[in-house]
Amino acid sequence: MLATTGWTALRPSGGGDPRALALSAWMRGSVGVRKLPDPESAPGTIARFFASLTKAQRLRLADRYPLVVGNLNGAPLALRYLANRRALATAQVQELARAKSDQLSAAGRHDAARLAHRFASMLSGHRQILAFDPTGAGRAAEVFGDLSTATRVSIVVPGVDTDLLTFERTSKPYQAPVGMARSLYGAEHALAPAARTAVIAWADYTTPAGVGLDASTGQLAERGATRLESLLTALPRHSEVSLFCHSYGSVLCGVAAPDLPRGRVADITVFGSPGMRAQHASDLGTTAHIWAARDGSDWISDVPHLEFAGLGHGQDPVSDSFGARVISAAGAKGHPGYFAPGTTSLANFADIALGDYTAVTCRNGGEVCVAGL
């Protein structure tokens, strides 16, 4: 299968691990005579710890351990945003220095300058950075809307080649996680201005580099699924969640599906999907509605939808035999175009996110995809 699809097994190696150093310092730290909690603790445990602190104590922790607090599910949202701004500011200064260093090659200085530019963008305005880790190619997540009061939360889960440099883009912004989430939030607001919604651009997992061996297996999806499940456990309990999973992100969502918090996830929508590591929607073991879309110009249709000896991701989610609710993606051009303004796919995503299922446009104009809801 690798030969027929042109996939390769090449992947660049990562760099140092600044967050590991921060975690090590955190584990040795304390507040007064109290040790700091294990960062792997359940979000509820983390939330209770921060609730027991004074405001000054919380701020000191964010200032001293920004790469920990900013990524800590269960920590107060405003504190995470603040910690990540501090971590980004530090990372920007470091990359600006590297961009001028004579210890780096011209290519290395160029990459450092690009990262510094990305961090400057993420620091601009009042952006709500929910997660930030500069280790290796890096991970990040951003919130649009008020996550603390939202009753409907959408999470955009991207696919291959997503890292700090590709987290957002200037040209055709809707092709990157930030632009995808911003487009969806704008479409939701246009349809229901009074609705309390939030959208998360969630690039907080290590994605495959290109369509190589990592992209053909579920290993990175399994690791990412654990991170997604932790995020969902930390979200406000009054919110209903919809997942929008693109490309390899749909593999992650398929792997995560059986362990998603029951009753929290109403919808899982996959698009440009190579498969969900399942032969049928019912095999996913979730009560969420399963939706699927693919534009006719998306190259993913040429990838064999099968699984053999751990390679490949199973049945095509838009096939009749899979059993998903297949929706129209009219207007979406190619693999990354599903959130482009004016597309039926974006309109459908917004309707699903708002729970307005009767407004969804089904594939071929039929109504079978919303029957029985």
Image (spheres, grey):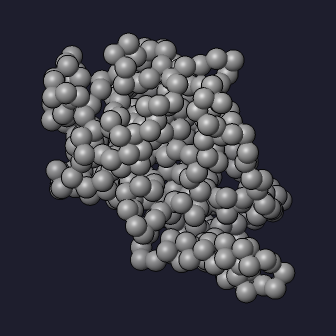
Taking the image as shown, residue 320 lies to the left or right of residue 283, namely left
Q: Residue at x 54, y 60 (%)?
A: 166
Quadrant the C terminus occupies: top left
Q: Is residue 37 above or below residue 105?
A: above
Quadrant the N terminus occupies: top right
Q: Residue at x 67, y 72 (%)?
A: 111
Q: Which residue is drawn at 67% across and 77% down?
A: 110
Depth check, front residue: 9 or 367: 9
The spot of residue 165 in percent (x, y) is 57, 64
The spot of residue 350 in percent (x, y) is 26, 45
The spot of residue 232 in percent (x, y) is 49, 40
Q: Is residue 373 above or below residue 159?
A: above
The spot of residue 151 in percent (x, y) is 31, 45
Write down the quadrant of residue 99 in the picture: bottom right
Q: Which residue is drawn at 45% across and 56% down?
A: 176
Taking the image as shown, residue 231 lies to the left or right of residue 178, namely right
Taking the image as shown, residue 160 lies to the left or right of residue 25, namely left
Residue 23 in sight:
no
Depth check, front residue: 329 or 29: 329
Write down the quadrant of residue 133 in the picture: bottom right
